[in-house]
Image: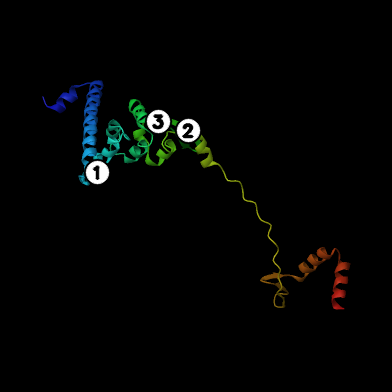
Amino acid sequence: MTDIAIYESMTNDKLITELAECLTVSAKQLVKAAQIFNVLELRGVDLSYLKTGLGAFLPAIANNVLDAEVVIRYAGRKDILNHLSKVGIDVQRKLLENDTVELVIDDNGQPRTETTSLANVRTFNLSKIFDFGRIKTVSEQLESYKQLHRKAPPKKRKNRKPTAVRSFSVDREHGGIRVGLLFAEPESLIDILCQFYGSVENLEKQLKNSQI
């Protein structure tokens, strides 16, 4: 019987157990590889050709920055591994036991908390969970959400000073007066001047004084 036939005959629980054992062996091999890598690098051996794929994380494993099993678990998600390299080995191993995180997301303008696998968290949401070498609590995520969605207060309008217009001309063709670039009918100007001086009488007095 071929290997694939053997696996197809196993139950899901048995297959999960088998897979976990394979990952454990792989992680142990990765730790061994990291230790060897570290010694060779200290001796000045050029190992730059190994710094791709999982090999890129060998120095972090050797320096106890990343757990080897974490590297196996999240292989292919360099963004997750970069964040995990800052939270410490203890936190990483807790995530290995229970690969779930709490994530606050926007749901039609309202915050909603969901429990999800870290492996399923998209890159742009990782910063909502991780913060300078620690994992944010739900309360902290909610506070960040409120700050992000807080409406800015309306800007106060500044009181603009009226612009003085010094250009006046008679527009006989249209029967009015040009005030700068604007056109005004004589009657409108008279009404405005009466309001400014308080009455027609006061306007007449002002006009007489102007003629002296």
- Answer above or below: position of 137 versus 51: above
- Which badge, 3 or 1, comes first in the chain's sequence? 1
Which quarter of the figure has residue 95? top left
Q: Residue 101 bears which disc, if any?
A: 3
Q: Nearer the viewer, mark 2 or mark 1?
A: 1
- Crowdedness near tag 1: few (<14), some (14–19) or many (≥20) residues, C-alpha within 10 Å: few
Q: Amino acid at mark 2?
A: Arg
The answer to whether marks 3 and 1 mark residues whose Cβ atoms lie closer than 8 Å is: no
**Residue 77, how many percent across, how many down?**
31, 39
Q: Which residue is mark 2?
A: 112
Q: In the picture, which quadrant includes the C terminus?
A: bottom right
**Residue 70, how many percent across, how many down?**
30, 32
Which quarter of the figure has residue 4? top left
**Residue 12, how many percent across, how many down?**
25, 23
Residue extending farthest to the front is 43
Closer to us: 112 or 50:
50
The Cα–Cα distance between marks 3 and 1, rounded to whole angstroms, is 28 Å
Q: Amino acid at mark 3?
A: Val
Q: Amino acid at mark 1?
A: Thr
Closer to us: 34 or 42:
42
Per the image, label 2 sits on a secondary structure element best described as strand
- Which badge, 2 or 1, comes first in the chain's sequence? 1
Q: Which residue is mark 1?
A: 52
The answer to whether marks 2 and 3 mark residues whose Cβ atoms lie closer than 8 Å is: no
The Cα–Cα distance between marks 2 and 1, rounded to whole angstroms, is 38 Å
- Crowdedness near tag 2: few (<14), some (14–19) or many (≥20) residues, C-alpha within 10 Å: few
**Residue 83, how many percent across, how many down?**
37, 38
Q: In the picture, which quadrant includes the N terminus?
A: top left
Per the image, label 3 sits on a secondary structure element best described as strand
